[in-house]
Image: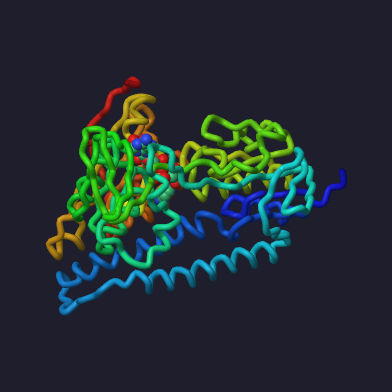
Amino acid sequence: MDMTHDLIVIGGGSGGVAGSRRAAVHGAKVAIIEADRFGGTCVIRGCVPKKLMMYAASFAHQFKDAEGFGWTDVRARFEMARWADAKKREIDRLEGVYDDMLVNGGVEPVRGRGRLVSAREVDVGGRRLAAPRILVATGGAPAADAFPGLAAAMTSNEVLDLREVPETLLVIGGGYIAVEFASILSALGSRVTLAYRDSHPLRGFDAELRGRLAKALRERGLTLACGVALERLERDDAGFALHRADGSVLRAAAALNATGRKPSTAGLGLAEVGVKLDARGAIVVDDDSRSSVPSIWAVGDVTDRVNLTPVAIAEARAFADTEFDKDPRRVDHRVVASAVFTDPPIGTVGLTEQQAALRGPVDIYAADFRPMKEAFFGGSQRTFMKLVVDGLDQRVLGVQMIGPDAPEIVQSLAVAVTCGARKADFDRTIAVHPTVAEEFMLMRTPVRRVPQATLS
Ligand code: NDP
């Protein structure tokens, strides 16, 4: 078989683009196949436009809070169509940046839908490409099969293209996507009901953050309909009706399905060439992101490991360095910082208190206060910060925060956690004053010592 390339990448999102460019830097001849727009979920219909919508929403409270700082006659009206037009221009610009990055990086962009025809060959609209290595980075897509009727609701794709704020909105689910859009659209003027089955949103996050987020969202005016299983969604002339297991029905003009995402593996010919998939349809890979077929690797959400853009990028670069630079590297998935862009936002890195306690005794340091800015104008929002410290060797195992700027603050502290800093290293760090972040350096005594827990 004649090889047309050294590497074929299927999927032009964050992982695919990063892997293809890094391989090209190492001298490989690379083709990258994309059926839609280069940039993928994160840039085109995910993190980036979501954050732009979050910025729009953040003004709602700033206008109000400004009065407490002496501003008068602050009046404003949000026009979603103007935001949507500006967002479209920015995403088009970023897509162009991605296209240029590929071409300038020596990668051949190929438009179309790629399908494996053997372990080393891919068909794209009748064109046959062949390479000794293939990287699958096709990401994921919203799932609509949690219960009947969900397919009629918007997903995170459509909500980002709204040109009007819905008067009432039912957000279904309690994960990242649900809480972020619930918070954003509420600030933009929608009356939002967030419906989820657990007692708090964000399963898997630190329990104190979950409780505080629920409280803060209620204080911002959202209705939290929780603790009851969800059974079916119906659409009628008035909008949507969500039927719950206790017989109650929640109604709204619009509905957003945020019940999770599933790996995009259908139609790629993976099973036909012997690539093993798990029960959710994700590609099973080893620590080097290699699939069950030795010439095929996979990175990012299509592998359903830690489904975050920077993780996909790290996995893709590790693959390229290992295979094309003979610099074997693996990604450590244990310490990954992440953020939830609600109001107030969450930043987290490392272990939650509950996870840490399963490994041994932990010391918990915490601060719960009304920041200077909030106190000045009489606001009620609080900030909560927490260090989860190993009770035996005093290593900082986790940093948890909910409050303004939490994602930015925790990103920086992620370096310390990754380096294995101990509590004494935080203590000897001189604070920047006056900041909110300095509280992490000023926690002197534990608020509690938690004994080792057992899995319940
Ligand atoms: P998540 O997996 O985070 O959340 C899915 C939600 O749907 C959960 O609350 C879950 O409830 C609920 N759910 C699932 N099945 C049912 C059911 N049968 N009945 C009722 N509720 C159900 O998915 P998201 O779609 O929110 O996010 C997908 C991925 O995108 C995440 O893994 C995240 O990594 C990424 N992402 C990251 C962001 C960030 O970094 N800021 C922002 C947005 C997305 P339960 O918990 O009870 O199972």
User: Is 390 situated above or below 105?
Assistant: above
The residue drawn where x is 27% and y is 50% is 439
User: Is any atom of residue 44 visible in this view?
Assistant: yes
The residue drawn where x is 47% and y is 69% is 88
User: Is 217 situated above or below 82?
Assistant: above
Taking depth in this image into account, of 121 and 257 the one nearest to the observer is 257
Q: Quadrant of residue 329?
A: top right
User: Is any atom of residue 352 visible in this view?
Assistant: no
- For ligand 1, give the image quadrant: top left
Location of residue 229 in the rendering, given as x and y in whole percent from the top left corner: 29, 34
Taking depth in this image into account, of 255 and 171 the one nearest to the observer is 255
Taking depth in this image into account, of 29 and 415 the one nearest to the observer is 29
| Left or right: 442, with 415 as reference point | left
Outermost residue on the front side: it is 237
Position of the C terminus by quadrant: top left
Location of residue 135 in the rendering, given as x and y in whole percent from the top left corner: 67, 45
Location of residue 105 in the rendering, given as x and y in whole percent from the top left corner: 69, 62
Position of the N terminus by quadrant: top right
Location of residue 193 in the rendering, given as x and y in whole percent from the top left corner: 24, 50
